[in-house]
Amino acid sequence: MEQVEKSPQSGGRFRAFLRAVLPLAIVVGAIVVVVILVTLARGKRPERVETGEQAVLVETIVAELKIYANQCSVKPCLRMAVLSPEQVY
């Protein structure tokens, strides 16, 4: 099998080309995608139809704040039993 020798310049030129062109291509591609999405969004808007219905009138009440005397008086009940190893099984 013959080995093909690559010149050191060929890889460097390609990388330099990518470094120069790739960021520009990404920006241009992003702009193109945004323009396409905007045109698609404009075309899909439905026509506005007036329903003609009036809003329903509702009655409201004023909320009252009531504080009870025994509020927050609940105490936690903790029970702990100490068992010997013979009692566990």
Image (spheres, rainbow, N blue to C red):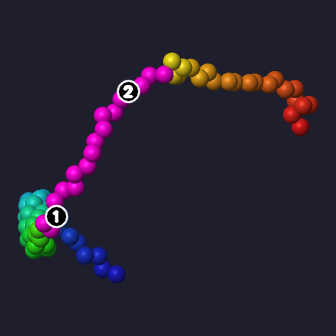
Can residue 38 be seen in the rendering of this structure? yes
Asked which quadrant contains residue 9, the reply is bottom left
Q: Name the residue tied to disc 2.
A: 65
Question: What residue is rendered at 36% in x and 29% in y?
Answer: 64
Q: Is residue 21 visible?
A: no
Dot 2 falls on a residue whose secondary structure is loop
- Which region shows up in magenta? 51-68
Question: What residue type is disc 1 on?
Answer: Glu
Say whether residue 73 is left or right of residue 2: right
Q: Which residue is mark 1?
A: 53
Is 8 located above or below residue 75 in the figure? below
Residue nearest the observer in this picture, 33 or 20:
33
The location of residue 10, given as percent across then percent down, is 14, 67
How crowded pointer 1 is (Cα within 10 Å; few <14, some 14-19, many 20+) is rated as: few
Q: Secondary structure at mark 1?
A: loop
Residue 37 point in image, percent of width and height: 13, 68
Tell which residue pokes out farthest to the top in this image: 69
